[in-house]
Amino acid sequence: MLDALVAPFARPEVGVTTLARPISAHEATRPDTVKVVRAPDGRALYFSRAPIPYGRDQEAEYLGHIGLYGFRLPLLEKFAKLGQSPLERVECLEQLRLLEAGIPIHVAITHHMSFGVDRPEDIDTVTRILNEQAS
């Protein structure tokens, strides 16, 4: 996953990277699973807790965001100085701060599974998964 995260930095115009993986339509309905849509060149167009894109007349393909980021140092310093943005406050997603500031995020695709630990109850889930993998 780290190789996929840093590979876009081979292009000098890429300053921020993150990862996403394909997810099911069912998983896309969960607000705890952050979704991302991206342009053909890999730039993030939007992140949301809602199922995006909306499949009006056809079945949509969903990407689940993996909250791992790579930054070139000047952009990390700029991000740290930015205040919360309006969309960030609405969605509770810090990456929207970058998009609203006009800073593109390159989204690399991975097919590796990962498990977020966002709440105390997630610790039990990850502990169980690690124990199962160790046996």
Image (spheres, grey):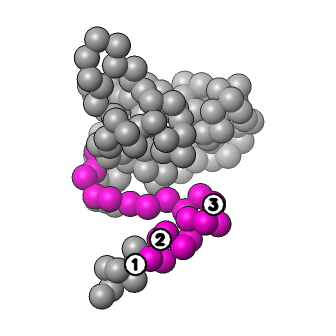
Q: Quadrant of the C terminus?
A: bottom left
63 or 121, nearer to the observer: 121
Query: Label 2: how many residues lie within 10 Å, few (<14), some (14-19) or many (20+)?
Result: some
Quarter assignment of residue 83: top right
The residue tagged 1 is: 130
Q: Earlier in the sequence, mark 2 or mark 3?
A: 3
Range drawn in magenta? 108-128
Instruction: Residue 129: say if magenta.
Output: no
3D distance between C-alphas at marks 1 and 3: 17 Å
Query: Label 1: how many residues lie within 10 Å, few (<14), some (14-19) or many (20+)?
Result: few
Residue 100 lies left or right of residue 19; in this view the side is right
Residue drawn 39% across the image and 29% down it:
37
Q: Secondary structure at mark 1?
A: helix
Q: Secondary structure at mark 3?
A: loop
The residue tagged 3 is: 119
The residue tagged 2 is: 126
Q: Earlier in the sequence, mark 1 or mark 3?
A: 3
